Amino acid sequence: DEKSSDPSSLLDELVAQVESLPWELPTREAVETLNRESQYAAWVLVHGYNVNHFTSLVNSHGVDSLRSLEQTIDALAAAGVPMKAEIEGEPGSKLRQSATEAVKIDVEITDQGQASTMPWTYAYFELAERNRVVDPDTGETVRFEGFLGPQATNLFEMTRVVAK
């Protein structure tokens, strides 16, 4: 039909799919129980297919005053953006990362059979500094494009909700 071929309608439908949970609203108890086992699983339970984070590559944005991870973090903190306390990765390493604190929003749940909400973390903004490494196959110096497991795990902790 004509409506389904309109690009803005298609975009609205896509956004609605991403923003809608593909399952019934979780109970408060289920969210809290799952959070004790896996904070990311609890995050998925309340947010479904929504975006968890966005990443900015600080060494490619072309702003001289923000060319390092430290400069970018300092500028965001000075602007009042709550930031992660530590930087993941040592100076000069192939990957260094930090992030804003995750925003908290009210998420829909059921509580004792009634529709309700509870505060939960949503998304954060990651900052990455990818340095140059020697490609072992070609010997060329290239930008590191991989991930480092422990660092990624620490960044995903930005959405952890501490049980009360």
Image: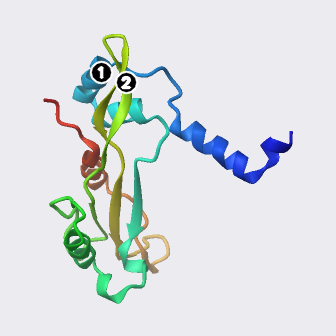
Which residue is located at x 37 percent, y 58 percent? 147
> Which residue is disc 2 drawn over?
109
Q: Secondary structure at mark 1?
A: helix
Q: Secondary structure at mark 2?
A: strand
Give how far across and how far down residue 35 sits, in percent.
26, 29
- Between 136 and 147, the one lying in front of the other is 147
In the picture as drawn, the residue positioned furthest to the right comes out as: 1
Residue 76 horizontal side relative to residue 23, left or right: left
Which residue is located at x 20 percent, y 64 percent? 87
In the rendered structure, which amino acid carries the disc numbered 2?
Answer: Ile
- Between 134 and 119, the one lying in front of the other is 119
Assign the C terminus to one quadrant of the image: top left
What's the mark number on residue 28?
1
Is residue 150 depicted above or below 141 in this figure? above
Which residue is located at x 86 percent, y 39 percent? 1
Which residue is located at x 66 percent, y 41 percent? 13
Give how far across and how far down residue 49 sits, in percent.
50, 39
Q: CB under 8 Å between callouts 2 and 1?
A: yes
Give how far across and how far down residue 43 sits, in percent.
35, 36
What's the mark number on residue 82?
none
Is residue 82 depicted above or below 35 in this figure? below
